[in-house]
Amino acid sequence: MTPEQRPHPKARYCTDQRYSGPNGAEVAMDWWVWVIIVLVVLVALTTLVAVVQRRRRRGGVIGLGDTGRNDSP
Amino acid sequence: MTEQPSPLLLRARELTGRPVVTLAGELVAEIKDVIFEHTGGAIAGFTLRNPGLFSRSRKDALPWHGIHGLGRDAVLVSDETVLLRTNELVPRKQARKGDVLDDRVLTDNGRDLGRVVDVVLQSGTGLEVVGYEVEASEALGTAGRRVFIPLPDTVAVSGENLIVPAAATEFVSDDLAGFGAAVDAFRTRLREG
């Protein structure tokens, strides 16, 4: 192997090490991480819908007549 | 209208979700809001929602005179023709701003008695508002506890606050069972001046 054919030391380092992201986290995530993310999003959305629906369905006690309340929209 | 043998006290929020059923047995809707008159405290009717968890509010309402019977488990109506459009019973602005739940209760001399968590109704010849259930403030000496405050015949409102006579603090009750007597005593006291 001539000196020209020999790989640059830095290039050999790159092939030896798997690439990591900026914080050291691997870019390719395992399948179960995606499952957890999807489940968390589903739980968050379900909770949000339940809270909104509960507020919409909540009953009130409404007084009729001159309330003295500010009637501006 | 169903005859009641003796006055019965109940919380307004107990009515929320109660099914409205025709005499033919058809489920029409569920009760959503309780509507009352500030003068006299009489119940004017109810707004409605469709049954089911993801249902919406309905655009029609049930006036008090359309009720055939108000039972523990259901409200009976002769048929759906007794329903009115909601804005005929309660103008939209009042429906948005007239809810007394979570309002503060102040005496006419400016003491904050607490926050309304429910409204107490009394059944007799009709159904009328006779008091508030409040989460008491420091002023009542039972901060954080729920107590019942009697109301005079006319419910006064100022801004976001509900005003009661200062004498009401002398008739505060801890339990609903004894609250009817407290209301009678309070109203007698007001009449006698």
Image (spheres, coloured by chain):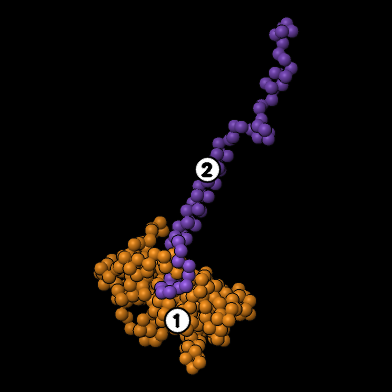
Chain colours: A purple, B orange
Q: Residue at x 41, y 81 (%)?
A: B40
Image spot of residue B97 (x, y percent): 46, 66
Image quarter (top left, top right, bottom left or bottom right) of the N terminus of chain B: bottom left
Question: Dot 2 corresponds to which residue?
Answer: A38
Q: Nearer the viewer, residue B51 or A57?
A: A57
In the rendered structure, are the residues bearing label 2 and label 1 in contact, judged by CB atoms less than 8 Å apart?
no
Q: Which residue is mark 1?
A: B154
Q: Residues within 10 Å of mark 2 (few under 14, many from 20)?
A: few
Q: Amino acid at mark 1?
A: Thr
Q: Position of residue B152 (x, y in %)?
A: 47, 84
- Who's the residue at 30% across and 68% down the image? B84
Picture layout, residue B182 above or below residue B120: below
Residue B14 shows up from this direction: no
Between marks 2 and 1 in the image, the one whose residue lies nearer the viewer: 1
Q: Nearer the viewer, residue B56 or B101?
A: B101
Camera-side residue of B133 and A37: B133
For label 1, the SS is loop
Q: Is residue B185 above or below residue B87?
A: below
**What chain letter is assigned to the residue under label 2?**
A
Q: In this image, A71 relative to B87: left or right? A: right
Query: Could you confirm whether marks 2 and 1 are on the same chain?
Result: no
Tell me the SS state at disc 2. helix
**Amino acid type of the residue that numbered disc 2 sits on in the rendered structure:** Val
